[in-house]
Image: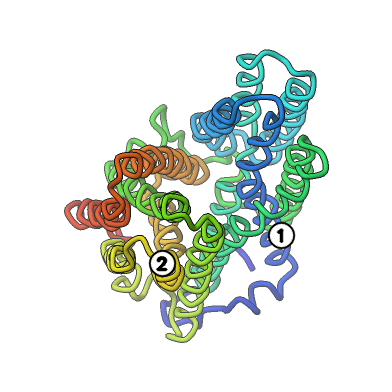
Amino acid sequence: MTGKPDGPATVAVGGYAALLGRPEGRRLALAALGARLPQGMIGISILFLLADRADVRVAGALVAAYTLGFGLVAPVSGRLVDRLGAHRVIRVGMAVFLVTAGLLVLAAVRDAPVPLTVACAVLAGASMPPLGPAVRARWLGLPETYRRVGVALDAVLLDVCLIVGPVVASALVAVRPYLGVLAIVVITGIGAYLLLSVLRVLPAPADGPGDQPRPGWWGPLRSAAYRRLLVVMLFASCAIAAVAVGLPALAGVAGARWASGPLVAAFSVGSIVGGLLWGRWGRRSGEPAAARPGLTRLPVVLGALVLALAVLPLAGARPLVLLGLAPLAGLPVAVVLATLAMAAGQRAPAGTAIEAQSWLVSANTLGSATAALLTTGLLGRGHLTATLVAPAGLALVAALVALATGATNSDRCR
């Protein structure tokens, strides 16, 4: 398995078994788990650091501070990896993250002033190594025969970790409030080790400065096509997060809190199934995704997301009906995220592969935060139906932006 093209578009596409049958494929998948599992653990792990000593609003501010730090600094970390090399940046970043996460735990355990604890949370989020963007850039660097399957697997692993992560974190914080954060550090360290071990035998195209031309101060943002893609990501992530936040919140308002967890899990299970099927689709067709632009065009997959999310208002505020429709609504989610990642990889200028994926993370973070504000605001005013309609409307805006700008996955940066 090398980073070189595999030749004509008629070459057979490798499947999940073929990809994971290779040692580097298995290590990359494990590195993806190390990068993704902490994402599912962060919310609960940080929320319960102060749960027994502070108001829930303060605990929520701590989660927001960590997320803000990570989202703001992710593009900078990605740029450093592109220009200085993954080995150097991730090793140093992991050491800094170990210190800042330790300071966060220490501030919480010692009952430090809230502003100091929040500042530690910002530093911990900002210093977290950019493993997710680096892993995704590495999947995109695979040969054409494995690229679609690798990106699909990455999106599916994210959904799995968003289901498993809260369960793991809940079990740990039930023993000691700080164990969740310490586990995040350990898991991130294992993921970093596995990723760097893969890069030793399978160097990423952007791993190190090499002799590539300098991308300039603006990095991938100098590409107009890439900037439009970020707008699409913003609205798409807002639509997806509006469901992830809105369904459990709606269940609570309807007096069915028992359904909150199952609703989110059902939505994620639908995404997992859709992502796995999309990854196998290329294999069954006998040709890679690049030869079938109609199947990977962003407006098409976003249109599928609009249709899937449009079924939610049919359920009204009936939790059992929502539970049945949630997997259907989630089917296109992993496909949308994987297609956006592939489009970002194609449109980013040379030497900006990981920074390009990092900007997607920032857009996703901003979209998710906006969705939380929008959804809770609608529910607070008693607009239950609008809460279910909003995700499809946001997805429609994303599809229209992609369609109006010609934002297809076959576009190149210009």
Q: Residue at x 58, y 41 (%)?
A: 210
According to the picture, the residue beneath numbered tag 2 turns out to be 322
Spatial CA distance of label 1 from label 2 is: 33 Å
Residue 30 shows which numbered tag? 1
Which of pointers 1 and 2 lies earlier in the amino acid sequence? 1
> In front of the other: label 1 or label 2?
2
Q: Nearer the viewer, residue 410 or 366?
A: 366
262 to 352, vertically: above or below: below
- Badge 2 element: helix
**Whole-percent x and y of residue 371?**
38, 43
Nearest to the observer: residue 134 or residue 157: 157
Residue 145 picture location, percent across and down: 52, 74
Residue under the point 41% across and 77% down: 9
Quarter of the picture containing the N terminus is: bottom right
What amino acid is labelled 1 in the image? Leu
Q: Nearer the viewer, residue 217 or 314?
A: 314
Identity, as a three-letter code, of the amino acid under mark 2:
Leu
**In the figure, is residue 219 to the left or right of 103?**
left
Local packing at callout 1 (Cα closer than 10 Å; few below 14, some 14-19, many 20+) is some
Where does the image place residue 47, in percent across and percent down from the top left?
A: 63, 36
